[in-house]
Image (cartoon, rainbow, N blue to C red):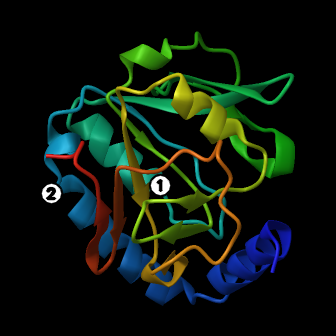
């Protein structure tokens, strides 16, 4: 199965989760996320504004802000370029490509200022931290510009595989930590 087909299968699997089950799993994942030292010591956290079928990031964003951690969200530009801009109570959001909410305006923060990036995707691999994203390459390109930032995945256990079921390319950036409702599924030496 090629990446495109595998992505479609993963999206369908995610859409089949009942709202009640999904909410319960999200709560467990969020709890495990906030147990991590990399999270409690972070000052600037980049995180996506999730789509309906993805893990809901809104409660995580609220909790980060309540903890006085600066939250930054992605904003896309021409030539498949992505930057992160601060999300505050004054930030206006508008749907962009694929209906994904993005900030209207905002000043991008330097990639080197980020402590932690919560990286979205569709499938993850337990043995090496490989990730299958949505196919645009936005995150892989951005992550190379922020090597100091911890790359953390929050996923449902059904998205994690013992080995990659998709082709892994040399430009794919590996993750530092993969967390599911069942706990940490992958952790590399960069994470304390």
Q: Position of residue 42 (x, y in %)?
A: 23, 32
The residue at the point 64 percent across, 46 percent down is 170
Quadrant for residue 120, please give it.
Answer: bottom right
Would you call the spot at circle 1 few (<14 residues within 10 Å), some (14-19), or many (20 or more)?
some
Horizontal side of 175 relative to 76 (left or right) equals left
Label 1 and label 2: CA atoms lie apart by: 16 Å
Residue at the disc numbered 1: 57
Residue at the disc numbered 2: 35
Q: Look at discs 1 and 2 and give the one toward the viewer.
A: 2
Q: Position of residue 49 (x, y in %)?
A: 58, 46
Horizontal side of 60 relative to 143 (left or right) equals left
Quadrant for residue 116, please give it.
Answer: top left
Quadrant for residue 73, please give it.
Answer: top right
Secondary-structure class at tag 1: loop
The residue at the point 84 percent across, 43 percent down is 97
Q: Closer to the camera, 104 or 97?
A: 97
Secondary-structure class at tag 2: loop
Q: Closer to the camera, 96 or 80?
A: 80
Mark toward the start of the polypeptide (1 vs 2): 2
């Amino acid at each position: 199965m090629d990446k495109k087909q595998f992505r479609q299968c993963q999206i369908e699997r995610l859409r089949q989760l009942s709202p009640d089950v999904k909410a319960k799993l999200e709560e467990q994942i969020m709890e495990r996320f906030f147990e991590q030292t990399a999270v409690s010591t972070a000052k600037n956290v980049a995180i996506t504004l999730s789509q309906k079928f993805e893990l809901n990031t809104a409660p995580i964003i609220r909790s980060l802000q309540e903890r006085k951690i600066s939250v930054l969200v992605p904003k896309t530009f021409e030539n498949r370029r992505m930057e992160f801009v601060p999300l505050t109570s004054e930030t206006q959001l508008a749907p962009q490509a694929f209906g994904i909410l993005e900030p209207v305006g905002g000043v991008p923060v330097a990639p080197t200022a980020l402590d932690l990036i919560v990286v979205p995707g569709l499938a993850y691999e337990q043995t090496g931290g490989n990730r299958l994203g949505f196919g645009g390459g936005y995150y892989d390109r951005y992550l190379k510009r922020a090597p100091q930032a911890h790359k953390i995945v929050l996923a449902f256990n059904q998205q994690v595989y013992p080995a990659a079921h998709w082709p892994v390319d040399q430009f794919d950036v590996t993750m530092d930590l993969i967390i599911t409702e069942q706990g940490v599924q992958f952790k590399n030496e960069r994470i304390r």
